[in-house]
Amino acid sequence: MSWVIFVVAGALVLLGIASISGRRLANAQRNGTIEELVAALDSTNESGRVNAYNRTIQSLWEGYDRERALQLIRAFTERFPKEKIAQYWIDKALTVEPSISAQCLDDAFIVKYYEPHVAQQCGTYG
């Protein structure tokens, strides 16, 4: 019986941490600098971090906050260079927002990370 209490208590602690992390991320997305947003994303559960980056980039993109979206694409790609969804976002940025991309994704970044043949195979879910 005591192990049930321990398991329930552990689950409640984890839910509380997830809730705090979620609030921190939402606040950083609304009001924070890109550094605060990256820190909030990096503090999310490791197993869901790629998805959290993807959802946040998509939200910024769809909200026409393209400069922060591009900055976040860069941070995401540097942390997860093998994720196909990173290729999707680089390709979309270069195609839709070439002038902002030129400011945020320099030539060295493009040479190091961009794989057009992979990007062409990807949709919004990698």
Image (tube, rainbow, N blue to C red):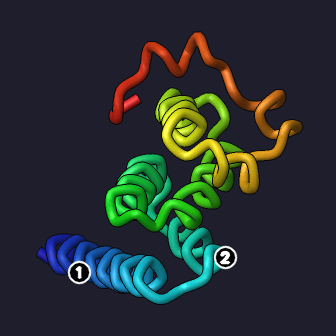
Q: Is residue 18 above or below residue 63?
A: below
Q: Residue 93 at what x, y percent from top left? A: 55, 42
Q: Residue at x 33, y 57 (%)?
A: 62
Residue at x-position 64% and y-position 54%? 100
Under circle 1, the secondary element is helix
Residue 106 drawn at (x, y percent): 82, 45
In the image, what residue type sits under mark 1?
Answer: Leu
Q: Disc 2 designates what residue?
A: 35
Say the numbered circle drawn on residue 12: 1
Horizontal side of residue 90 vs 50, given as left or right: right
**Circles 2, 1 touching at the beta carbon (< 8 Å):** no
Residue at x-position 62% and y-position 17%: 116
25 with respect to 62 (left or right):
right
The image quarter in which residue 57 lies: bottom left
Residue 122 placement (x, y as % from top left): 42, 22
Closer-to-camera residue (50/93): 93
